[in-house]
Amino acid sequence: MKRLNGKSGCAVEVTLSVVGGTWKPIIIYNLMRGKKRFMELSRAIPSATQRMLTLQLRELEADGIVQRTVYAEVPPRVDYELTELGLSLKPVLEAMRAWGLGYSALAEPDEELAQEMARV
């Protein structure tokens, strides 16, 4: 598990130390819909390299957010799913998604205005 006492002592810092970064929130968001195999996650997040995806999944597993299940089959099958702790992040990720949609909607008119001003 990651350190719980950060530089600031702020609970937001603790949350970010576990789920922060570019890929972890996206991985968690994809797993909110249910179990996924590695290649399903890889296809859902094409801009993340397989190495980065593996590293991020390992960190999320170490922090108790993701559970990795290996099946004794040939070829081996590995599933990833959110733990109960991981599922508790659902409202956080949904709030982040809603905020991002709202922010994107605000930013779009500014782009149109900038393009219009450039034409003048």
Image (cartoon, grey):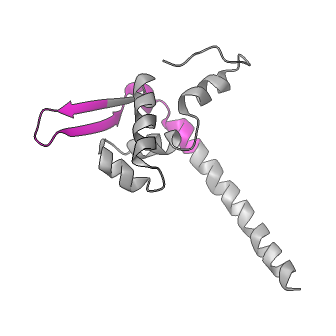
Place of residue 105 in the rendered image (x, y in percent of width and height, measured from the top left): 68, 62
What residue is drawn where x is 27% and y is 38%? 79
Q: Residue furthest left?
A: 74
In the picture as drawn, the residue positioned furthest to the right comes out as 120
- Residue that lies at the very extreme toward the bottom in this rendered image: 120
Residue extent of the magenta highlight: 68-95
Up the image or down, 4 lies above or below 13; here it is above
Return the x and y of residue 107 as percentages of the image width and height: 73, 62
Which of the 4 quarters of the picture holds residue 104?
A: bottom right
Tally of numbered tags: 0
Is residue 115 left or right of 104 when viewed as pictured?
right
Query: In which image quadrant can residue 94 be found?
Result: top right
62 up-or-down from 82: above or below = above
One can see residue 7 in this view: yes
Q: Is residue 24 left or right of residue 4?
A: left
Drawn side of residue 24 relative to residue 96, left or right: left
Q: Nearer the viewer, residue 44 or 54?
A: 54
Closer to us: 89 or 59: 59
Q: Is residue 96 above or below residue 5?
A: below
Q: Quadrant of the C terminus?
A: bottom right
Q: Residue at x 37, y 28 (%)?
A: 83
Magenta stretch containing residue 69, yes or no?
yes
Q: Is residue 32 visible?
A: no
Residue lying at 52% horizontally and 41% vertically, measured from the top left = 25
Residue situated furthest top in the rendering: 5
Q: Residue at x 73, y 61 (%)?
A: 106
Q: Is residue 74 left or right of residue 102?
A: left
The picture places residue 5, in percent across and down from the top left corner, at 64, 13
Rendered location of residue 69, percent (x, y): 25, 31
